[in-house]
Image (cartoon, helix red, strand yellow):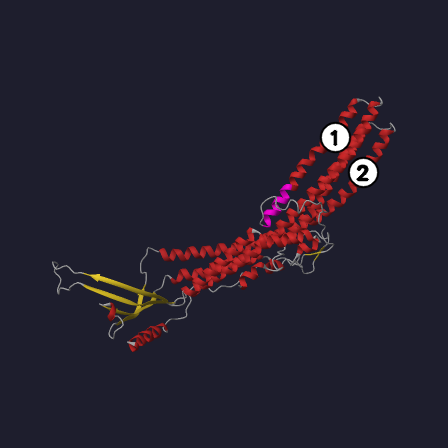
Amino acid sequence: MTRRLARAATGLAASGLIAACTSVGPDYEPPQTEVPGAWSGPAGGGLVADPAELESWWQRLDDPVLDDLVLRARDGGLDLKTALARVAESRALLGVAGADRLPTVDATGAWESRAESRNTPVGEFIPDFSQYSVGFDAAWELDLWGRVRRSIEAAGADYEASLEDARDVAVTVAAETAVAYVDLRAFQKRTEIARTNLALQEQTLGLVQARFDAGLVSESDVAQARTSVETTRSRVPSFEAGITSARNRLAVLVGLPPGSLAAELDATRPIPVPPDDVAVGVPADLLRRRADVRRAERELAAATARIGVAQADLYPRLTLAGSLGLAAEHGSDLFESGSDTHRYGPSLRWNLFDSGRLSERVTAQDARAEQARLGWEQAVLSALEECENAMSSFVREQERRAALSEAVSQARRAVELARTQYTEGLADFQTVLVAERALADLDDQLAVSDAAITTDLVTLYKALGGGWEADDPVARIAAD
């Protein structure tokens, strides 16, 4: 029995040596595209062309609370956990594809009781009998045309694309956390400004009320002063609602229920201020750094490999199959001499006619690869567009903020002069009212601009592809 089993195994293995190493379909070549040598956006605003250092860009905003929130969002946020789960799925599917290179072996066991009819025109009558059997069945597809190899190549590219997708999610999570944090501090600042201006307007109302009581001004001045007070007071609830929304958004980003960070973020802090210099590198860096561009390139590689998978189905498929086992009428005889059985040999399957179904699948996969190539080109162009727009917004908002800062300074001086002139009877109350309203509006616009500058910087950091390298959570799961 041992020699028969050995001969069967040797025959099966020897037959496998006829497998060729041909792989049909195109061999993948990374796409190439031309990118500008320099940015076309405006200079200034602290932007420098040195190679960008974007690993932990949020730390450049010098706010420890923000640093902590970003790290918590990356570790506990559900978006990144979901992306990492997709990485684990892709890695498992790569293992499935790789397993097709090896034979499959199934253990079998059966008991069969059989009875033949005495009244059918069969040759020799076979009495009732039972049969016990145990053994192993094996099958191995010889990868003559590279179908399996191309499948593994495609699955590997899919896995690498999932890694880049998770890194892109890490970039997005960091940026969303920073934007929500800036929103929180901006609403806190706007609330503080509104209350300061409210106090100033209430002082003016008291002044007008005293002059009205003394018969020096009409009731119209009192009504206008009170209108200004209540208008400013009406802004506070909407700003407080904005504070709540921003805190809730941050809580969800770190994987907690809304409201969980209310006490932790209750204290007012300044809006984070951008650094003096922001390194943006050159456009060519995007092809290396942007995770979404790298993901699109890997998707193209996977689509190209699947052309070979589709083409291999046009050719014969050769499979080696065999079984080794034991069979006997009585279970007690199963392991006796002479109970061994075996069979092995190749089988060929070749689809000769299917009304063009397989060739159309090749055409369809060619079209998918072309879509993936165009998708990669679109990802590159979109990355360039996002960077150019973000740089322009960042620089222009700084110019706007400088003008607003000067306007606020002048508006505050105008309020002081108007109140003095009104008290001395040299100006009517309308002058005071207009000056105070202008100050309140410009103060609020300045706070919004402060937040917009930092938000634009966060958008720029995201557009440049920074943020996934720092303690890369994707690398951790990939190394497991």
Q: Secondary structure at mark 2?
A: helix
Check disc 1 and report the residue beneath it: 228
Residue name at image x 67 percent, y 36 percent: 237
Our reading of the magenta stretch's main secondary structure is helix
Q: Is residue 152 magenta?
A: no
Q: Position of residue 342 (x, y in %)?
A: 28, 71
Which mark is in front, 1 or 2?
1
> Dot 2, crowdedness within 10 Å: few (<14), some or many (≥20)?
some
Is residue 306 found left or right of 416 in the rendered image? left
Q: In this orientation, which residue lies closer to the viewer: 310 or 11?
A: 11
Check disc 2 and report the residue beneath it: 412
Q: Which residues are magenta?
A: 244-254
Toward which corner of the image does residue 136 lie, by quadrant?
A: bottom left
In the image, residue 127 sits, relative to residue 204, either above or below, namely below
Q: Position of residue 335 (x, y in %)?
A: 27, 72
Please tell me the numbered disc located at residue 439.
none
N-terminal-most mark, 1 or 2: 1
